[in-house]
Image (cartoon, rainbow, N blue to C red):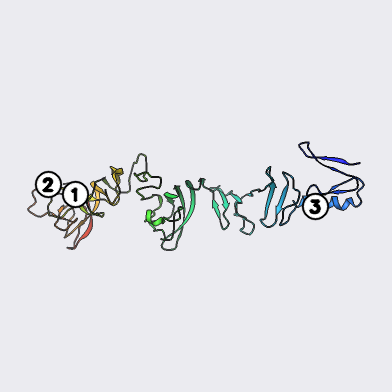
Amino acid sequence: MAYDINKRDGTLLVSVADGVLDSTTSIKLVGKNYVGYGEAIAEDFVHMLEHFANTTEPTNALKGQLWFDTTANKIKVRDNNNNWKELGQLIANNTAPSSAVATTGDLWFDTTAGNLLLYIWNGTAWQPVGVGNNNTYVGYVQITDTASVVHECLVDVHDKKYMTISNGDAGPWTPLGTEVQPDGTTTVVSEFPTINKGINMTNAVTPASSSSEGYKYRGTATSAEYADVAERFAADCCLEPGDVVVLGGECEITKSTIAKDRTVVGVISGHPAFEMNAGAGDNMSHPFVALAGRVDVRVIGQVNKGDRLVTSDVPGVAKVTDAEFSNWETVIGRSLVNKDTEEEGLIEIIVGVK
């Protein structure tokens, strides 16, 4: 007499007739009075123990069934759509699993005190798991410098571009020219020329997200690495840090060209501590002019600490005012150092101090 085999949800799977070995599923279902049933049942148990380990999937699989894919070295489960879905492997240990047993997508939780990080095997290495999506996320990267030293860094990515690079190594160091950002084209060194210990922000003026302001720290600063207060002004020529500028030209400022110019406004800053009018443009069209504080300036001739500096007739270059000095309006600032040579050089001054 045939008997019915029901699934866990109560639905009928198959009716097994007397004396037959039914193949409706991946295991053989033994009918009543089947001769040689012992071997069939024993093999069923073995196949279930090894989760049907093979290079090919088991035939007539049921939803929820497990299969060990020996090619991928993965346990898979049959889902509601009759697809084989991999079961991820999570390992908790204070030692990274060997690459010999790791497969792409495996997870490892490092239980080492002070670390406690989750890693994913990317096919070649264990990489800490970041937060976000393919375009915007926080993640871990290794960046090689020009001396071939590999630095472990934490990056803040927005629109596939680095906003910040955090690094604990002594700096400064320069990224290798072949290191590229997640967009696949922008080099790291183009927006991070040097990287120091701590949080480094991109020098990109226009982010890919279309904002014209550029990336910058938003908050209240209690101290700054640099020491000048600067504002953007429209320039009519290409200006470099250290250039002395005056009001005039075709725009708002231009490079100084005459000695003791009363229209002198300041010095082009390379690293302002405080940026005013920051959204007016970029460093080409609207460079930052240091109006107060310490800044490097191009100067010609010998200089003594404390000397007052004025414009010279060399474009963009300052000089020490002479004994005939009589107009405070021409003073750019005062020197903080001595300079013993006659040729042009770069010195630090306090700009705006008469």
Coordinates of residue 351 in the picture (x, y in percent) = 21, 48
Q: Which mark is residue 250?
A: 1
How far is mark 2 from mark 1, CA to CA?
26 Å
Is label 3 or label 1 in front? Answer: 1
- Which residue bears the numbered disc 2? 328
Q: Which is more N-terminal, label 3 or label 2? A: 3
Residue 241 vs residue 199, the one in the foreground: 241
- Which residue bears the numbered disc 3? 46
Residue 168 vs residue 12, the one in the foreground: 12
Three-letter code, disc 1: Glu
Q: In the visual, does 15 lie left or right of 156?
A: right
Q: Residue at x 49, y 49 (%)?
A: 139
Three-letter code, disc 3: Val
Q: Which is more N-terminal, label 1 or label 3? A: 3
Find residue 73 and report its image quarter: bottom right
Disc 3: CA contacts within 10 A as few (<14), some (14-19) or many (>=20): few
